[in-house]
Every structure is written in C-alpha cells, then in structure tokens.
Amino acid sequence: MKKIFWILFGVFPLSVVYSQESAPTASSSPTQIVSSTSPATAGDVEALRQQVQSLTETVKALQQQVKDQQAALQKANLTGESGLPENPEPSPIAGAEQSPTPSGSAPPRFPTEDTSVVSSTTAPAVSPAPGASPNQLPGSFPTTDTSVVTSAPETISTTGAGASLTQPITIGGGKNYMNISLDGLFALAYSSARDLDHIEVGDHDPQQRGFNARNIELAFDGAVDPYFEGFANIVFKLDNDNETSVEVEEAFMQTTSLPFNLQLKGGQFFAAFGRLNPTHPHTWDFADTPLVNGLFLGPDGLRGVGAQASWTLPLPWYSQLIFASQNGRGSTGFSFRNPGDNGMFFDRITTDREARGLQDFVWIPRFENSFNLSDTQTVLAGVSGAFGSNETGANSRTQIYGADLLYKWKSSHAEGGFPFVKWQTEFMYRRFQAGHGADDSFPVAETFHDWGMYSQVLWGFKKGWVAGIRGDYVHMQDSTFTDDLDRQPRWRLSANLTWYPTEFSKIRLQYNQDFLEENFFLSAREVESVFLQWEFILGAHGAHKF
Amino acid sequence: MKKFFLLLPVIVTCSFSAQAKLSVVATLPDFGSFAREIGGDKVNVAVLAKPTEDPHFVDARPSFVVSLRNADVLIDGGAELELGWLPPLLQNARNPKIEVGKPGRIQASQGIRLMNVPANVTRAAGDVHALGNPHFTVDPIIAKAIAQHIAQSFSALDPANAAFYQANYQKFETTINAKLQEWGTALLPFRGQHVVAYHDSWPYFAHRFGVAIDIFLEPKPGIPPSPSHLTEVIAQMKAQHIKAIIVEPFHDRRIAEKVASSTGAKVVEFSQFPGGLPGTDNYVKLIDTLVSRLAAALK
C-alpha cells in the first residue's frame, strides 16, 4: 500500500509538469489575443464566449481522436501488426495524462519520458521533483514515456531456474508451476545385419530394420518450494513387436539453496559418470550409444534409485566434486547387481540377492574441472568411478574408472550457437570379478580387465547444420571359459549429418560401420548400418547444459 | 619478514576493499554497461555474453557458474532472452543471493511494458517470446528506467554508497535526456520511413525515434532467410524505396549484401550491445553510433 503512495508521489509531479507544459502551448494564441485587448466590452465577452465554445469543441474532437487512435492501436496489437506495446490495464494516472507518444508531440520536441513503455517513475528517492528536474527542458524531446515503462519493479517475471519458453502450465489453482514437455525420437534404420538389436548396444538405439520409436519422453520440472526443485523423465518405448513399455528414467528432487555451494539430490537418476551417461538420448550428437557406454555402463546407462551430494569448490575456476550412491540393482546397474538375461551374466548363473551391507551399493564419485583457454575456447575434463559388487559370485566386485575430456570452440560472432567445433572423448576401464555363479555352479572364477573408449568431433559449420564423426573401440579380455558374445572386442566408425530446423526439431542421417570378431548369426563380420533419425519437442525445451 | 609485516596492512585493506565492492554479474553487455554507469568504481562488473554473439544462444560455460556463485547481484533481462542458457547456470551456481525475488536479482524487464506480446504462443510463428519482445534496452527511455532500477538495488544492498549510486543515476538521466534531443533531431527527417532488419530486434528503437523497422530478412524470428521470402522482401523494398538493411554482428552479412545490391539499399551494421560495434564501449556511445549510422544511410 505504501508503495502505491510512493508511485503516486512519483507520478503526480510529472503529470503536473506535463499539464503545465502542455497548457501554455495548446492555448497560447487565444490567450495572447485576449490579453492584448484591455477594456472588456460586451463584444469582447461574446468573442470570448465563442472562443471558449470553439476551444471546447476542439478539445472534444481531440479527445475523440485520441480514443479512436487508442482503439485502433489496441486492435493492431491484438493482430500483432503494430510495434506499439500492448497496454492491457492502463493505470488511471497514465490514462488521465494522455501519455504523449513521440508522433503526437510537436516536431521539435522529442519526448524523454514515455509512460507507454516505462510504467512509473519508481522510487521516491530518484523521482524527479518538479522544477528541479533536468528532464523538463521547454521545447524538448520528451524524456519519459509511460507507454513503455509499466510498473514499479515489484512484479516478478518468470525467467529463472525452471522457467519455460511457453507460459508455465498451471496446475492446482495457479499455485504450482511446472514445465511439461514431450519429446519424440524416431529412426528409420537399415542394417546389413538382420539382428540390429545385437549390433546396437543401447536400449534407445534403433533395434530393427525399418521404423523405430525407442524414446518418447515426457519431461516435467519445476520449483517444488523455496527449498527444492523436482524433475521427472518418463520414457515410452515401442519394442520390435510394437508393444509399449514405460520406463521411469529419472525422477528426483534436489536442493536449491544449501550453504557452502552444496547440493543434494535424491530419487531415481542417471549417475554422473562421464559426459554422456547423465544425458538423455535426445541431446546426443549421434543416433546411438557409444559401444563402451552400452557395454560397460549398460544399455540404459548407469542409473538407479539413490542419493547424491555435490560441492563446487571455492576456487577461481570451475571445479566440482560429486558423490552418489545407488542400489545398482537390475539392468540399469548393468555391471553391478544385475541378474542378467534369463538369470545369466557372462555365462554365470547369477545370485540376485538382497543387499548385505554398504558394499553392495554402487558408489559413484566424480571430479570435474573446467578452464577457458580463450574467450572462445573451453575445456572440461573429468574423472569418474563406479564401485560395487556384482551377481556372478558371492563376493565378486566390479570397479569402473572413467576419464573424459571435452573441448569446445564457438565463434565470438555465433548466430544461434553456430559455428562451433566440439571434441569429446571418454575412456573407461572395467575390472570385473566374475565369480563361481550361484551355488558355485561355474567351475572358474576369473577377473576381466576390459577397457574402451570413444572419441567424436562435431562441427557446426552453418546455422542449424552439424557434421560429426566418431570412432569407438572396446577391448574385452580374452577368456577361454566364457563364450558370451558380449565379451568380444569390437570397434565402430560412424559419420553423420544433422539438420536442426530450429532447436525444437532435428533430422539426422548417420552411417555406421561395425567390425566384430563373431556375429550372432555367423554372417558377415563387418556390419553396415544407416539411420535416418528425426525428433520433435513440444513444450518447454530444457536449456542446454555445457 | 619485516617487509611482510609492512605489507600486511596493505594486503588486509586490499582484500577488505575488494570485499566491500559489490560483485555484479550481468547476463548481457547492455546491462553491464548500465551497472558500470551506476556503480562506478564501487562495483566489479562481469558480463557473461559477448557483445558480438547471438544473445539467444550463449554457451553455458562452466566459468559462468563460478562468476554467478560469487555474485552479490545478478542483472538479467527477465524476458526469456537468456532462457536457453541461464537456468542451468543458476541451478549449478547455488547462490541464494541472486534468486528471483531477492534484492540481489535485478530483472531489467520489471516495470517495462514489453512490445509484441503474442496473444497465442505458438512455435509455428518461429522463436517468439511469450512475454514479449525482449530487445528493449535500445530505447533510451527504457534504459533510464533500468538504470534507475539498478541504482535502487545497489543502494539497498550497499547503503553506504547510496548517495553515490543515486548521483550517478541522476548524471546518467541528465545525459540521456540531453542526448535524446540530439538523437531525436538527427532522426526527425526520417520519421515514418521504412527500414529492413535481419531480425526483429528493433521495435523499441523504432518506436522511440519514429522510424518503421518492420520488414525482416528472417521469414519468422529465428528462421533463416529463404529465397522465396527474400524475393518478397526485395519487391517490398523496391516498392517502398527502402534505403537501409540493419544487420547485427552475428548475422550472415552476405545475405543482406545480396538483398542490398539488388535494391540499391545500404547495409547498416547495428548492435544491441555496447562493444558490439567499434568505438561503442558504453551505452550512450552505442546509441550515438546507431543514430548516426542510420541517419547516414537514410539520407
């Protein structure tokens, strides 16, 4: 309430000044005539009366004109044809003083105020006092404009963490806001191998010759309250028989305002292991998962129910420590407590037991640092680990270590984020203790030392256009006791071209050449695949993380 | 050792005075320029986006997280221009001082009546902003309101220097008011003339100075120019004898040149941001440059 008074105080002197200023100019000629004739005669009175009459009419006509113009403007605003601002609820004060638009004022006076754009002179401290104000030079261009400045800075706009490109969808009587988006990712695939689902290692990759819909994603996010944000990604997948399955890919809450640069997160989430694992398929630069990610962290990536703490170190550069713990159970804890397909993993019958203690959880630390090499070049480097037990024996354990590097150059004259060059590499090493299986059913316990990497370069050469090339290699330690085809060394070369008509859609053509030691159908050991991928996004588009 | 003790008070005062300065982060260079005008040597200003790059698409570089984490004040547009990159930075910065609603958060659009607010938000219309056109700082009258807003916020956060900030605002206001006469006079002969722009970044500038910047090389905001659309634009330009095409530093100048050569118009390089054109290291110089360039092209 106080504020309103202050605003009134701020605006009142202004309007006074306006009226003082405009009054003499509007009526200057008649007053001069009147004052020059000194003795008042009946004729003079009659002349005056006529003058007043004509003035009144002029004012009426002007008022009508203003009204018409306003109506026309409003109409134009509705149709979006005019550049003039929409003024849905003009304040009574602004309306009373008939805010002068630049075109309405006399030619030599340029306005310096504009209430149609600036709502009100805001606080009393700086509101111009009449007379003392420097902005009311007679015969000047106005320096205020109430048609552009609307209201005191109490109104809160929506940009901020979790704001959306669309108006927020309101649920629950306008009290809670959340962003909703739907993302559809599809692919038309051809492969020289009939079993594309064995060649591709990711669950969201194309799985069969022909059409694929492996990632239709509903995403929700928003501020829960002043303390938490919530996120959820629900994925619908169509399998090769067109049956729909649903996956709660992520659903978690995280803190927003803990002290000491700390953040806590809890729920179902992707482990912060490397660059690619924590991201959703629609943000990937290729149509499929790199081999090392699919074969070490799993077809669905390493994710699970758990909790995470992260801390950005108080250093002059970006440096962050992340530490998470997850159950690591099931196929989303692929190298960990994963019962495998039909209860088998690396040819062992798996134990599928309950957690015995902390050693059965997956522990995932990560440390990442970033530096700017120049104004246009950035490097982000990280090391990650994932430690836990697996199901191939009573006490068998898995350790995965990862290192990742991202280099990005972006032009200082970038339009729409183009042109850019991005080089991303991830390396992983896995130590996997394969035990005797459930009830000591497998004769041999062995330890596998596997490693793999991918490296990719993306070149955004023109607005909306990106060309990419990627090399993949996975080395699996040779075992005479296991002939699981997932344990063969293999490599792959990929090239693609992507067109982003806008940031809400993309069309991608990708070529893959796979080299395998053995194929599942014992056919060709070199496999060629071509994917035509396309995507659309409706609703809020999650902002781009680096 | 003795020398160290002699230096100690210097170090201490230095670090104290460094702490006493408000640490201000501006998402875009225009807000940074206002912050420097108002804050003078009492604040440290860091600007995230480069003046020459497209403000819609700025990389959320991790170093920005560090700047935001240490900020006392964040100035952003508040009109979704930075929507594509600011939210994840803020999420990562975890700085309660600059949350929306806190005194440390200045959203420039507060108190500004945004133009071209779409009645229906549909992306079929291209990259439309639900809250209205966010390129508002090129209207000097709006710039004054933002500067005033900044002065008020700085004063509230740093009351010891309130008088200094207010005085700087008054100085800025006086300068702009005087300059407005100059700018208004320079562009007065071209009132009502049509001008072509690559992107719809100039409705506020046009509204202020009475020129009509209402034909665009982009068929829809954010959509690259298509040959058929350019043909239409060229026909329109010929019919209306349009003399100038406005491009920004990050736009494909060749497209504008091509249109210019087939219509006899001039390509005028404009920037929304101080520093985006040579010799425009502050806001007043920027508008000076824009006005004189446009006046020269329309002559």
Image (spheres, coloured by chain):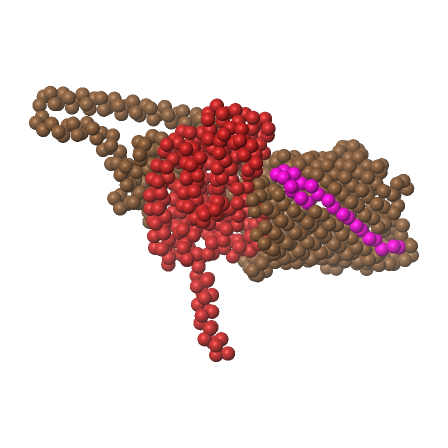
Chain colours: A brown, B red
Q: Residue at x 44, y 68 (%)?
A: B13
Q: Is residue B223 visible?
A: no
**Quarter of the image where one finds residue B161:** bottom left
- Which contiguous range is marked in magenta? A458-479
Q: Is residue A286 visible?
A: yes
Instruction: Give the quarter of the figure containing the N terminus of chain A.
Output: top left
Q: Indicate left or right for B19 with A199 as reference.
A: left
Percent coordinates x, y for residue A228 in the rendering: 57, 49
Q: Looking at this view, is A332 or B248 the one in front?
A: B248
Q: Residue at x 70, y 37 (%)?
A: A508
Percent coordinates x, y for residue A236 in the rendering: 71, 37
Examine the rendered structure and indicate whether residue A48 appears above or below residue A249.
Answer: above
Q: Looking at this view, is B133 or A8 the one in front?
A: B133
Examine the rendered structure and indicate whether residue A498 appears above or below residue B29.
Answer: above
Percent coordinates x, y for residue A545 in the rendering: 61, 47
**Quarter of the image where one finds residue A429:** bottom right
Most prominent secondary structure in the magenta stretch? strand
Q: Count numbered badges in the picture.
A: 0
Q: Residue at x 84, y 37 (%)?
A: A192
- Residue A193 among magenta residues: no
Q: Looking at this view, is B77 or A165 the one in front?
A: B77
Q: Residue at x 39, y 50 (%)?
A: B151
Percent coordinates x, y for residue A419 in the rendering: 62, 43
Examine the rendered structure and indicate whether residue A316 appears above or below residue A502.
Answer: below
